[in-house]
C-alpha cells in the first residue's frame, strides 16, 4: 500500500463546488453554534484517481484552537471501476466525522481522533482518519521568539507525521 498523505488542493479536483462547500461549512457552524466558543468549521473535499480526501477544521477566532481532522479513502486500483462516486464517498466520510464532532463538542472535548492514520469504515466505505490540535497563536509567538533570539544551543526539529 502507498503511504497515506493528505495532499495539497492544487493537485486534486474539488468534490463539491465552492458554493456547496461553503454551505456545508455554514450548516455545521449553525448545527454546533451553541457548543462553540468564537469558533467555526471549515470543510474541504477533493479527489483524484488515487484517493478521495476531506478535511474538517475547527478553528477559534483567536487562533488558540486549530483542530483539523483529515480523512482519506484510497482508491485501490485505477483499472477497477469505482462503485461509488467521489461525491458519495465524501458524503459518507462527512456523515462519519459529523458524528465525531457531535461527540467531541458534547463530551467536554476529551475525545480525539488518533495522531497517526487510523482505519475506519462507514456504510461499506473504508477510510483513514487522523487529527491534531494546535495552538497557532502560541506557535506564531514561538516563531517570533526564534526569529528574534534564535534556538539557542539546541537544534529544533519540526514535528510531523509525514516522515
Image (cartoon, helix red, strand yellow):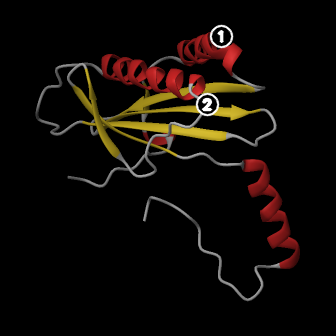
Question: In this picture, is 108 found above or below 129?
Answer: above
State left or right for residue 69 relative to residue 59: left
Q: Residue 155 at what x, y percent from top left?
A: 65, 82
**Looking at this rendering, what residue extends furthest in the left direction?**
80
The Cα atoms of the two marked residues, 2 and 1, are separated by 19 Å
Q: Residue 12 at what x, y percent from top left?
A: 42, 36
Q: Residue at x 52, y 25 (%)?
A: 101
10 Å neighbourhood of mark 1: few (<14), some, or many (≥20)?
A: few
Q: Residue at x 74, y 57 (%)?
A: 139
Question: In this picture, is 131 found above or below 162?
Answer: above
**Looking at this rendering, what residue extends furthest in the bottom direction?**
153
Residue 50 versus residue 31: which sits nearer the camera? 31
Q: Report the mark closest to the observer, 2 or 1.
A: 2
Residue 93, image quadrant: top left
**First in sequence: mark 2 vs mark 1:** 1
- How many numbered marks are there? 2
Which residue matches tag 2? 108
Tell me whether circle 2 and circle 1 mark residues in contact (CB < 8 Å).
Answer: no
Q: Residue 124 at what x, y percent from top left?
A: 20, 22
Which residue matches tag 1? 30
Q: Residue 78 at what x, y percent from top left?
A: 17, 37
- Label 1, secondary structure: give it: helix
Question: In this picture, is 76 found above or below 101?
Answer: below
Report the disc number at residue 59. none
Residue 163, image quadrant: bottom left
Residue 92, image quadrant: top left
State left or right for residue 36 relative to residue 15: right
Amino acid at each position: 500500500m502507498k503511504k497515506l498523505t493528505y495532499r495539497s488542493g492544487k493537485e486534486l479536483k474539488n468534490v463539491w463546488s465552492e458554493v456547496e462547500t461553503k454551505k456545508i461549512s455554514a450548516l455545521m457552524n449553525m448545527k454546533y453554534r451553541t457548543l462553540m466558543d468564537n469558533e467555526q468549521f471549515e470543510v474541504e473535499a477533493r479527489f483524484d484517481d488515487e484517493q478521495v480526501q476531506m478535511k474538517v477544521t475547527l478553528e477559534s477566532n483567536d487562533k488558540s484552537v486549530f483542530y483539523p481532522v483529515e480523512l482519506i479513502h484510497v482508491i485501490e486500483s485505477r483499472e477497477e471501476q469505482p462503485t461509488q462516486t467521489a461525491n458519495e464517498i465524501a458524503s459518507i466520510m462527512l456523515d462519519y466525522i459529523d458524528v465525531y464532532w457531535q461527540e467531541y463538542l458534547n463530551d467536554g472535548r476529551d475525545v480525539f481522533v488518533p495522531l497517526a492514520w487510523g482505519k475506519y469504515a462507514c456504510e461499506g466505505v473504508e477510510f483513514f482518519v487522523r487529527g491534531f490540535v494546535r495552538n497557532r497563536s502560541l506557535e506564531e509567538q514561538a516563531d517570533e521568539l526564534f526569529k528574534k533570539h534564535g534556538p539557542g544551543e539546541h537544534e529544533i526539529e519540526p514535528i510531523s507525521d509525514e516522515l
